[in-house]
Structures are given as C-alpha cells and as structure tokens.
Image (cartoon, coloured by chain):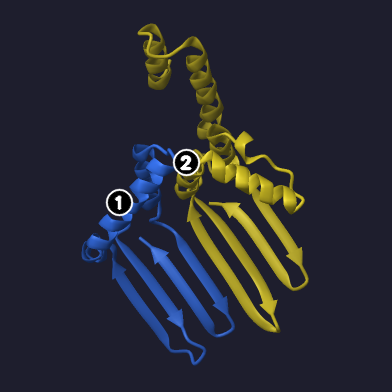
Chain colours: A yellow, B blue
Amino acid sequence: MNEQRRDILQMLAEGKLTAEEADQLLAALDRDEPAAAAPSSDGRPKAKPKYLRVVVDGTDDGTPSRVNIRVPLQLLRAGVRLAALIPPQALGEANRELSKSGVPFDLTQLKPDQLETLIEHLDELTVDVDQPDAKVRIFCE
Amino acid sequence: MMPQSLTVRATRPNGRPIRIWIPVLPVLLVLSPLLILAAGIAAVACVVYRVSLLRAFGTGWRIMSALPGTRVDVEHGRTAVLVVVT
C-alpha cells in the first residue's frame, strides 16, 4: 500500500472524509498510477506534460506567418478555477447570448471538477489541421 | 512561484530588433499604489456580485504563479514579436 492510499484510509478512519469521498480519491489514484508508471519506449517513466503548445504555420497575402504559443497547463487549471468564480447573473447573460448565436449551451451545467478532469486529460490531446495555406498543431509537451 | 521577468523581443520590418527585459517585482513595487486601488475595486466588485473574496484573490494569485513558462511567438514576414514570462 503506498503513502497516498494510506493517508486517504487514515482520513476515512478519523472521519475527516466520507466513504464516498474516499472512494473518489482512491479511484483518482488508480487512474493516475498506471499513467505515471507506464514506461516510455526507452524504459524511463513517461514525463507528465507541462505545457500546451499551439503552432500555426500559414501564409497571409503571400507572406509567411507563424504563431507559436506555449501555455503552462497550470495556467489552464488556474483559469478553470477563475471560471468557477463567474457570478450566476453573468453566466445567465452568456447563456442568452450563446442561444442567440445558435449555440444552445448551458454554462451553469459546467462544473469546476468536470473542467479539471478535462484539463487532466489534455495531455492525450493532439489536434492537427492541414490546409493548403495553413497548418495548425495543438498538443501537450 | 511568481513571475520574475518578462522579456519582449520585437523585430521591425527593417530587420532591427528591439529587446525589452522587464523585472516584474520592481515594476510591481512602483505600481503598488495602483495595484492597491485595483485590489480595492476588485474587493468591492466581489462583495457586490457575492463572490468569495478569499477565493477570488486565491485564484488571482494562482494565475500569477502559473504564468512563468508562458511564451508567445508571432512572426509575420520580417516582423516578429516574442513574449516570454520567466
């Protein structure tokens, strides 16, 4: 049994966590452990990505242009927490505007922990868009 | 960790580069009266919109701390702008 598992069970025994919370934490550990333990092709454990990279190569009126943005994933996580602070009135207003634009999306249903999970799994994301005059790549590194 | 410096490098169409290095902490100290005023306004806004003051400032600090490592590099023909937060 590793240290984190023992801590969770200890907190459950002391009544600091409910059984449901402990179960969720143990499940989260189970999810994280295989990923952390999975070795890469050269035998070393695979490092967790730290940055989200957006690279756009294209031409604008015949002039070559390139955009290369590197954003720490930590910044995305912090941004998600900021989104959780948006007052309900503002979310209602945003929902109305989205509906007017033909995007019936309810932002109030978006929970911070769901967004957190989304960020957690961003490291598996790679988007490649190839067009004759532009190339877009989004990936984590 | 809070950002320590901001480096801006711009290359003009004539090829002449400009490089600006901004140490964050001294700039924040110089701008501290304005920052205190902004923090006061933010606190009032939090109270008006019933947002937890502690959570709001905590999140602001998290964002500041997560900024190091950010890099924005834009090139268009012979013009280029690079912004790096360290």
Q: What amino acid is at disc 2?
A: Leu
Q: Which residue is mark 1?
A: B40
Are marks 2 and 1 in one subunit? no
Pick the quarter of the image with the N terminus of chain A. Answer: top left
At x 60% / y 72%, what residue is drawn?
A66
Residue farthest toward the front in the current orientation of the protein: B48
At x 53% / y 35%, what residue is drawn?
A112
Is residue A47 at all visible to an observer of this figure?
Answer: no
Give how far apart the Cα atoms at labels 2 and 1 are: 17 Å
For discs 2 and 1, the disc positioned in front in the rendered view: 1
Front residue of this view, candidates A57 and A17 = A17
Q: Which residue is mark 2?
A: A85
Quick one: SS at disc 2?
A: loop
Q: What amino acid is at disc 1?
A: Gly
Percent x, y of residue A141? 53, 51
Label 2 marks which chain's residue?
A: A
Rendering quarter of residue B49:
top left
Position of residue A64 relative to residue A70, above or below, is below
Position of residue B56 relative to residue A139, above or below, is above
Percent x, y of residue A26? 50, 19
Left or right: A122, with A82 as reference point: right
Circles 2 and 1 in contact, beta carbons < 8 Å: no
